[in-house]
Amino acid sequence: MTNLDPIRSKRVPRFIEEYAKDRNGTRAAMRAGYTQHENAASVVAARLLGDVRIQQLLAEQLERVSKAACYEAADLLRDWIEVATADPTGIVTVRRVNCRHCWGFANGYQWTAREYAAAVDKAITDGKPCPPCDGGFDFSKIRDPNPECPECEGEGVAEVFVADLSTLTESQRKLIAGVKQTKDGVEVKLKDQEAVREKIAKHLGLLIERRELTGKDGKPLVAAVVPVDLPTDPQALGALYSQIVGG
């Protein structure tokens, strides 16, 4: 290969692509398939990187990679902003709905017809009397509370409501970290918006962490003097360590 023009090698495009990843010529030559011997790969890389034509191709590739990285960073920032500003109450919220006595006849316990039929069947199977049905059979779980209900005093009951995910905005969908079915219903896990806001602040340089270092019991730090010849005796070495760390 030493007698051939390097630019004509079919491995050159691969070498350029690999070099742009970590800018390590030796590893790039090995990944491009020139050789798996590190010393030989180093020689190949030096020869390729010394060619002005390959340098030009590398410069163009690195520029493309740099632009792509900028675009990816901008896309990531946009995603973060959407997650940080999405309205979680449009995904999962708590609403107040009527209790079983709110709208029952004379505020008695209200059933649905299917519920009551199932309760009667169970009572017969268990040899027990049928449950009372004086409240009627028109219960609807989505009705508003009855402000004059003597049972819940107009407050109704709290119900966790999960929205139809197909109706969510793009930002709300990005806020969702996962959905799973549990024995108690559907569980929706949301991303930590506060943590995302902190990422945005750091990315924009709005959040600077400052740390103040002090010595033991808040005293000023004192530079430790470490002897050139460390003791070999374990006890003496332990004593020196304690002296350095302030123990």
Image: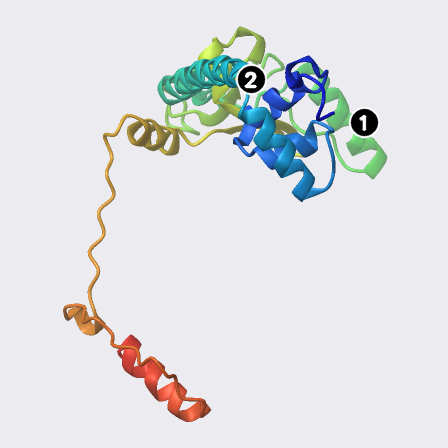
Which residue lies at the image location 22% right of the left edge and 73% below the top edge?
216
Q: Nearer the viewer, residue 237 or 74?
A: 237
Quarter of the image where the C terminus is located: bottom left
Earlier sequence position, callout 2 versus callout 1:
2
Looking at the picture, how far across and down is residue 29, in whole percent? Answer: 66, 31
Numbered disc 2: secondary structure: helix
What residue is pinned by disc 2? 54
Residue pointed to by mark 1? 121
> In the rendered view, would you say 21 is above or below 146?
below
Q: Is residue 244 left or right of residue 27?
A: left
Which of the pair 191/212 is nearer the observer?
A: 212
Residue 247 in view in this figure: no
**Quadrant hosting residue 246:** bottom left
Residue at (42, 17) in percent of width and height? 70
- Depth check: give the residue in front, 41 or 13: 41
Q: In the rendered structure, which amino acid carries the disc numbered 2? A: Ile
The residue positioned 49% from the left and 18% from the top of the image is 62
Q: CA distance from mark 2 to mark 1?
A: 84 Å
Residue 49 in view, yes or no: yes
**Horizontal and vertical percent position of residue 205:** 25, 29
236 lies left or right of 57: left
Amino acid type, mark 1: Asp
Closer mark to the observer between disc 2 and disc 1: 2
Q: Position of residue 187 (x, y in %)?
A: 58, 29
If the image is split into quadrants, where does the N terminus sit? top right
SS class, disc 1: helix
In the rendered view, would you say 238 is above or below 181? below
Relative placement, left or right, of 231 versus 170 is left
